[in-house]
Structure formats: structure tokens, C-alpha cells
Image (cartoon, grey):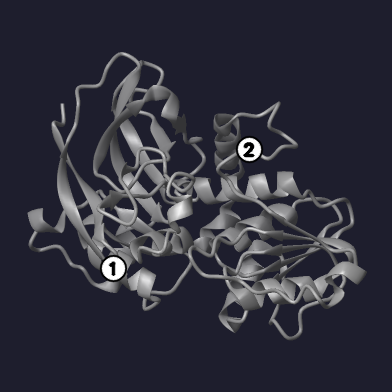
Amino acid sequence: MVEEARAFWITEPGRGEIRTVSLAEPRADEVLVRALRSGISRGTESIVHAGRVPRSQYAAMRAPFQEGDFPGPVKYGYLSVGVVERGPDELQGRTVFCLHPHQTAYVVPAAAVVPVPDSVPVGRAVLAGTVETAVNALWDAPPLLGDRVTVVGAGLVGCCVARLAAGVPGVGVTLVDTDPGRASVAAALGVDFAGADDAPVDGDLVVHASATEAGLRRALELVRREGTVLDLSWYGDRPVTLPLGEAFHSGRLTLRSSQVGAVAPARRDARSHRNRLALALALLRDPAFDALLTGCSPFDALPETMAAIASGTLSGLCHAVDYTVDPTLDPTLDETAEHEEARCSG
């Protein structure tokens, strides 16, 4: 029985540390999970790390198993993959996904974990929460056969939406970003790529996921008359100004939001949060999602890693946290970039 674990806490805006936490003895309906890998949700966790969660959203933005309160100290995160070391027979030894903060081990209700399909590698499984967001978005605004879909913002959420939308027969998808380096990611996902200035106009559905005012403005310019712009971005405490005096009314455009906290109304009566997460894990059998795994570092480096991601000095898509090696226990461990990439693969 693990009586203690270590967890990442944001102690105050801009600063984090690793703390020791106590674990309760798991009850009959609970599991003890030893973490293998977790993922960092760049947009949301950067806002949390910087202390920019609006006070009005403190309750709405609480993550499952969060401890503490915004702006801090707070234990936050929701992309964890681990192995069940104690629990019901059907879960014992299974690799599972859980919406849990960054922590080396944890005790949660058995119903809070979802088994990872055998054909989905641990590294790819950390994307489940983001793919779940993309699933919910396409339930909110499903593309029709033959639609032209434009996704503005080739971040992690935007890329997941693009890959799923491209699976609808006859749908053409263009991923739009200001970074030309994202063209290779778009190619790996099987979709077209365009810069902001040369993006195709008259899209039937434009999904905005850049988390910028400029991106949302551009999305409104790219959608066809009577088309829909679906906004997946969260801006934290930043105000957003839009040119609604231009073609918004004359073009009869629809601007709607989507957020993963609630199952989309179109499926709310038929699907639970658990059903949706299980679907996301099943979709991750697709190896194309590996293109979104762009970095990995050890758990002990998480305070520095999170600060670098929040400040923008560490770029990429999904940055993973590896729990399988403790460098403090092996002073001979080679921490070169090549070793780190090899150790975090799979």
C-alpha cells in the first residue's frame, strides 16, 4: 500500500512546487492508481498557472479531484494515465485514464477511471481528455456530408477536431494557423493547411481554437453566409472585441460556444461523461494522433516545465509528464534530449 504520493501544486500565480500528499486506504468501490504519464493542457493550465481564472468562473472551472482554490494554492490537471494497483478484480492491473491532477499515485472511485484499450499506447492515451473535447464540439456542431470545415488554430484541441472532422465522408478540412511549421502536423492528420491570410473562405463550419481575439475575428471572416462559427477557446480574464457591425448580421452568421464540462445537448439524453470518454479512448486507436505528442519531461521537472509552457518559452502541442523514472534515485541517468525522447516514447 502506498501511503504517500507526490503532487504538483500551483502555490501562487506563476509558481509551482511538488508536495507530498497522503493517500487514504482504498475502499471496496475505489482504486489505487500508480501514474505512468500525464498530459499538460497548454491553454487551460497556462491560464491557471498564471492566476487568470476569472473569479466568476472559479466554480465552473474546477477540475475533477482538484484540491485547493483559484488562484492558489491549487492542485490542477485532468489528463492522467496509470495502472490500477489495488481495486476490483476487473480493474486490477489495467491501464486506465482518469481526469486527475499531476500526481504520482492517487485513490479515486472505481467509476472515475476508464480502461485504456490494449491497442492504445500509454503515451497516446493522455490525449483522451482533449479528444473528448473534440468529440463534444462535433456533437455541438456536426459537419454534414460534403461540408467544408475550417479549423482556426492548430493547437492541440484544433488538431483533434480537424482529425475527427476529416473522418466524415466527403468533408474537406483545412487547418489554419499563423505558424507555418504546423503544416507538417496537418499533413500527418490528413488535412489541408493554410496560413491566416490565405485560408479558404465560405466554410460551412468554422471551428475557432486559437484562444486569440484575432483568430476569432478571422473565423467570422471565413464562414459562409448563414454558416456557423463554433468557438472552443477559453480566454480566461481577457476581454474579446468582435466586429459585429460588419457582416455578422447581414450574413446571418451563428456564433456559438462549446465546452467539455457538459455533454452536448444533442447527446445529453443518450450519452454520459463516461460514455464520451470511452469513445475518445477508442478513437485514439488511430496512430495519426501521435503527431500531437511533441515533448516529454520527468515529473520532478514539472515546476520548471509548467512555468516554461505558461510563459511560452516551451512550444509544442501535447507535452507529457513521465512518472516511470525518478532521476533522484539514479544519479547515472542520462538526461540528454535523445534519452528523454526515447524514455518518453510509447
Q: Position of residue 76 (x, y in %)?
A: 34, 50
Q: Which residue is mark 1?
A: 14
Q: Which mark is residue 315?
A: none
User: Is residue 272 toward the left or the right of residue 192 in the image?
Assistant: left
Q: Position of residue 66 (x, y in %)?
A: 34, 42
198 shown above or below 284: below
| Residue 193 appears in the rendering | no
| Residue 269 appears in the rendering | yes
Q: Nearer the viewer, residue 311 or 319?
A: 311
Q: Which residue is mark 2?
A: 263
Q: Residue at x 67, y 50 (%)?
A: 137
Q: CA distance from mark 2 to mark 1?
A: 32 Å
Q: Residue at x 63, y 58 (%)?
A: 232
- Neighbor class of circle 2 (other Cα within 10 Å; few <14, some 14-19, many 20+) is many
Q: Residue at x 37, y 69 (%)?
A: 310
User: Is residue 16 toward the left or the right of residue 149 in the image?
Assistant: left
Q: Position of residue 129 (x, y in %)?
A: 51, 46
Kind of residue sitting beneath label 1: Gly
Secondary structure of the residue carrying numbered label 1: loop
Secondary structure of the residue carrying numbered label 2: loop
306 shown above or below 323: below
Q: Nearer the viewer, residue 51 or 328?
A: 51
Q: Position of residue 325 (x, y in %)?
A: 21, 52
Kind of residue sitting beneath label 2: Val
Q: Residue furthest bottom?
A: 197
| Sequence-earlier tag: 2 or 1 | 1
User: Is residue 108 toward the left or the right of residue 6 in the image?
Assistant: right
